[in-house]
Image: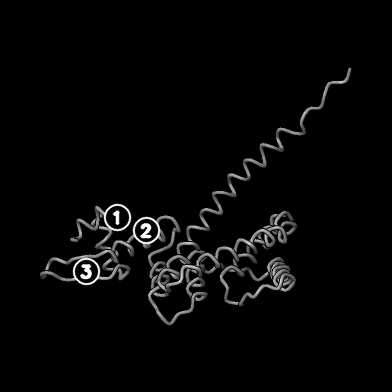
Amino acid sequence: MRIGDLSRRTGVSVASIKYYLREGLLPPGELTSPNQARYGEEHVRRLRLIRALVDVGGLSIAGTRDVLAAVDADDVALHHVLGATQKALLGTPVVADDDEAARAAKLLDDLVERRGWHVTETNPGRPAAIEILATSERLGTEVLTRLLDTYAEALEPLATAEVGAVVARGERSDVVESAVLGTVLGAGLFSALRTMAHESASSRLDAGPAAGPEEG
């Protein structure tokens, strides 16, 4: 198919496709003439992956490039691909050098040890969590600190199920793409469902206890 057909198949404008080609996110098509190229199903699949990362995941072009490089590298282990995706999603949070951050780091490290998690120092979630907990303390609220184990308990089975579902795909290319999409789209879905659950919980609290029978 030509670039116009690729655009119609994917809903991505020709200008955006050309931009992704220039940025190296989309591999070039097969040249049929000096100014024409032919594209295949692999380009359709890659474009849909790019759009998921950029539009749904909110990744930058640089972050998307890093993730796709990990996806394309046959010698990169799955957890390193996940790490590149998580880093692109979270960025590199700057952790303040203050007492609140030190207490937050201790709190988080104690949680990891207590629950037997295997987390490296380079995990991008660690500095993000430290800064969130530290910010919470600076604002004078202990809600997140009190909920830390509740979050961990809820996330452990979810993480196990997500990784298991991805690995079950079999083929490496399918596993890696599913892992990337699961990480990006799963984060969005988790946030969306959490918002819905908050509304439901709030409405139940606002309604108060059910009224009992009137006394005679």
Q: CA distance from mark 1 to mark 3?
A: 15 Å
Categorize mark 2 by other alpha carbons within 10 Å: few (<14), some (14-19), many (20+). Answer: some
SS of the residue under disc 2: helix
Image quarter for residue 138?
bottom right
Q: CA distance from mark 2 to mark 1?
A: 9 Å
Q: Is residue 88 depicted above or below 207 in this figure?
A: below
Q: On the rendered image, what quadrant is the N terminus found in?
A: bottom left
- Which residue matches tag 1? 10
Kind of residue sitting beneath label 3? Gly
SS of the residue under disc 1: helix
Kind of residue sitting beneath label 1? Thr
Q: What's the residue at 51%, 58% (across, down)?
A: 186
| Residue 213 percent coordinates (x, y) | 82, 24
Question: Which mark sits nearer the N-terminus, 1 or 3?
Answer: 1
- Which residue matches tag 2? 51
Q: Are marks 2 and 1 in contact (CB under 8 Å)?
A: yes
Q: Residue furthest right?
A: 216
Q: Residue furthest top?
A: 216
Categorize mark 3 by other alpha carbons within 10 Å: few (<14), some (14-19), many (20+). Answer: some
Q: On the rendered image, what quadrant is the C terminus found in?
A: top right
- Which residue matches tag 3? 29
Question: Which mark sits nearer the N-terminus, 2 or 1?
Answer: 1
